[in-house]
Image (cartoon, rainbow, N blue to C red):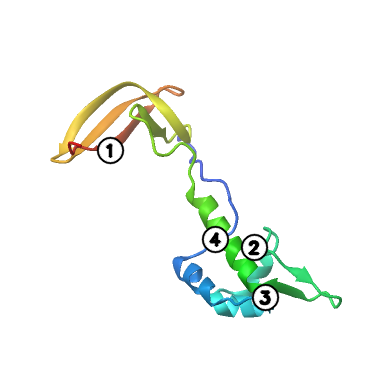
Amino acid sequence: MPQLRRFKPYTGPSFRRAQIIRLGRLLDMEYKPSEIADEIGIDVSAVYQSYLPNGCPHRRDKNNHIWIHGTSFAGWVKEIVERNKKVPGFPLDEDEAWCVKCCKVVTMLDPHERKIKTNLNMIYGKCSVCSGKVNRLKSGKVK
């Protein structure tokens, strides 16, 4: 029976590098969602469908119009980006590897090291949870 792939759970909106760089253009003032979209180079529907439901700092005026503060929005985006960069369990210890079946960092049972190239070694063993094969690369350079 084929194994089902487990994907990383949705962690909120994602941003491209160019969009993050354009955040520096935002001023200490309030923008309409369409203006924010134009400034950072996205579609306005992304603001309404992804950013606002996921906690984008905004306010509504008495006419129910949405206003987004520029520098607050830039700070919120930077928090999201930093949160998405952090992967629990990394960097790995010497006897740990990522198990694709378990979708987590596990301890390797009976680890062996094999030279692949001049400065590259492969450490392989068995997963301590599911007994599947796990491996990882290690620099062969002497420290």
Residue drawn at 69 percent across, 64 percent down? 57
Q: Identify the amino acid type marked 2.
A: Ser
For discs 1 and 4, the disc positioned in front in the rendered view: 4
- Tell which circle, 3 or 2, labels the residue nearer the N-terminal end: 3
Alpha carbons under labels 3 and 1: distance apart: 45 Å
Q: Name the residue under label 3.
A: 33
Q: In this view, does 27 lie above or below 129?
A: below
Q: How many labels does the image show?
A: 4
Q: Mark 2 points at which residue?
A: 50
- Disc sitting over residue 78 in the figure: 4
Alpha carbons under labels 4 and 2: distance apart: 16 Å
Image-based side of 6 in relation to 70, left or right: left
| Residue 59 x, y percent position in the rendering | 76, 69
- Disc sitting over residue 137 in the figure: 1
In depth, the one of 98 and 74 nearer the eye is: 74
What kind of element bears circle 3?
helix
Q: Identify the amino acid type marked 1.
A: Leu
Q: Identify the amino acid type marked 3.
A: Pro
For discs 4 and 2, the disc positioned in front in the rendered view: 4
| Residue 53 x, y percent position in the rendering | 70, 60
Residue 128 in view of the camera? yes
Image-based side of 122 in relation to 39, left or right: left
